[in-house]
Amino acid sequence: MMDRMANSRKEVTRKQRIEAEQRRRDELREGYARLKDVLPITNQKSSKVSLLERATNHIVNLTKMNETLQQRLTAQDLEITRLRHLNERISGIVPGSSTALSSTPPSIIPPSGQSSSTGQPLSASDHVQSPSLLHLSPNPGNAHQSAANGVDENDDEHAGTGGMYAGKLEPSTPSSVDLSLGSTGEKTY
């Protein structure tokens, strides 16, 4: 009777070990299948050893790629910082600019003479919002008037304009600009 109980205990223990081993093998099989699914596809049928080698190589390659991308990102961050500082320096050099430049970009007029919102040709009633940067009056005829306003055309502040922007630089607020077509078909402001 003791032998029978001892044998039944041994049998139960043996079955438990077999079940545990089966669960372990199932988990390994599932793990290999998941690993195979995430690795790049190859045409060769692979053993478990070659699957592990491919996984190792792939991880090493991803690590190297990550390091390279991190270095590029750091370099680009430094370049962005350098360009921002340069932009700030250039913005500070703009003549007559006592106010901060607007961060809102000016409205863009399509070169084809069509409204950007409707795709229809521009008419005399179309208006474009001007940016709130600096207001310059583009009038080449004001070159003589600029001397009366105290603006010297040879002054460094107005160098390069050729008298085109005669008058004083004044901060402006957004205003509506009429975009009508002149007699030559060109846009006038």
Image (spheres, rainbow, N blue to C red):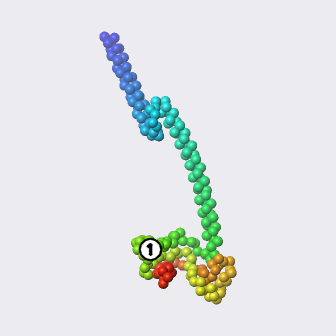
Disc 1 is placed on an element classified as loop
- Under mark 1, the amino acid is Gln
Horizontal side, residue 110 vs residue 101: left or right: left
Horizontal side, residue 28 vs residue 74: left or right: left
Quadrant of the rendered image containing residue 136: bottom right
Q: Position of residue 135 (x, y in %)?
A: 56, 79
Q: Name the residue under label 1.
A: 114
Q: Is residue 41 above or below residue 80?
A: above
Q: In this view, does 3 lie above or below 70?
A: above
Quadrant of the rendered image containing residue 94: bottom right
Q: Where is residue 6 in the image (x, y as percent from the top left)?
A: 35, 14
Residue at coordinates 43% horizontally, 79% vertically from top-left? 123
Residue at coordinates 46% horizontally, 30% vertically from top-left? 47
Horizontal side, residue 129 vs residue 71: left or right: left
> Depth check: 145 or 12 in front?
145
Residue at coordinates 52% horizontally, 74% vertically from top-left? 131
Q: How crowded is mark 1: few (under 14 residues within 10 Å), some or many (20 or more)?
A: some
> Depth check: 5 or 35 in front?
35
Visible residue check, residue 149: no
Q: Position of residue 97 (x, y in %)?
A: 61, 75
> Depth check: 179 or 7 in front?
179
Horizontal side, residue 155 vs residue 25: left or right: right
Q: Where is residue 21 in the image (x, y as percent from the top left)?
A: 40, 25
Q: In this view, does 30 lie above or below 94?
A: above
Visible residue check, residue 64: yes
Quadrant in which the N terminus appears: top left
> Depth check: 128 or 12 in front?
128
- Residue lying farthest to the left in this orientation: 1
Residue at coordinates 44% horizontally, 74% vertically from top-left? 114
